[in-house]
Image (tube, rainbow, N blue to C red):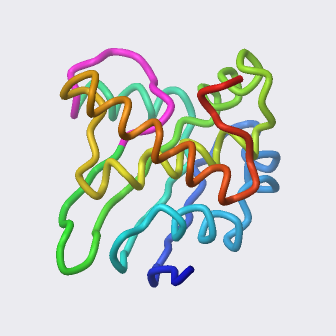
Amino acid sequence: MSLQQLQLSLQFGRFDAAAAHRAVLSRSKVTRWIRHALAADAEITVRIVDAAEGQALNLQYRQKDYATNVLTFDYQQEPTVLADLVLCAPVVEREAQEQNKTLEEHYAHLLVHGTLHAQGWDHETGEEDAEEMEAYESDIMRELGFEDPYQK
């Protein structure tokens, strides 16, 4: 399988558990996970934030007053993908526990999910689109050596 090129900026906000999240999110792992979800070369910034920053961004850009797991800011899809992915560490950690997943597994899934959004995939446009996106995410996750995120 030929993987696309990726220029990655990996950033961590200042929060209490940042060291634990940084340990799970090595540059090589994040690069690998994102590259498996890319259909074109990309420049992507991944930022791991606390609940306050996650909530503020979600409110400002989606008018939803809560921190969500991943926000995708897609700026360009061709000829290269340009995007920012913002993941809220406390939400990701809580969801991983609730879903009986490792933190690494959940981060991998959310990075794949956000990368697909950056390329125009959208699960909120209808049931058929949601099923297609979920199936593709599941394929990518299995390719990466993880279980199907929707079968846990």
Image label count: 0
Is 44 or 77 nearer to us in this picture?
A: 77
Residue 148 point in image, percent of width and height: 66, 37
Residue at 79% across, 50% down:
19
Q: The magenta stretch spans which residues? A: 61-71
Residue at 66% across, 25% down:
151
Residue 76 point in image, percent of width and height: 18, 66
Residue 39 point in image, percent of width and height: 36, 70
Q: Overall secondary structure of the magenta stretch?
A: loop
Residue 68 magenta-drawn?
yes
User: Where 37 falls versus 110 (above or below)?
Assistant: below
For the N terminus, the quadrant is: bottom right
User: Where 124 falls versus 110 (above or below)?
Assistant: above
Is 45 or 133 nearer to us in this picture?
A: 133
Residue at 41% across, 25% down:
55
Residue 69 point in image, percent of width and height: 50, 31
Residue 26 magenta-drawn?
no
Is 27 or 81 nearer to us in this picture?
A: 81
In the picture, residue 109 is in which quadrant?
top right
Residue at 47% across, 40% down:
135
User: Where 29 falls versus 103 (above or below)?
Assistant: below
For the C terminus, the quadrant is: top right
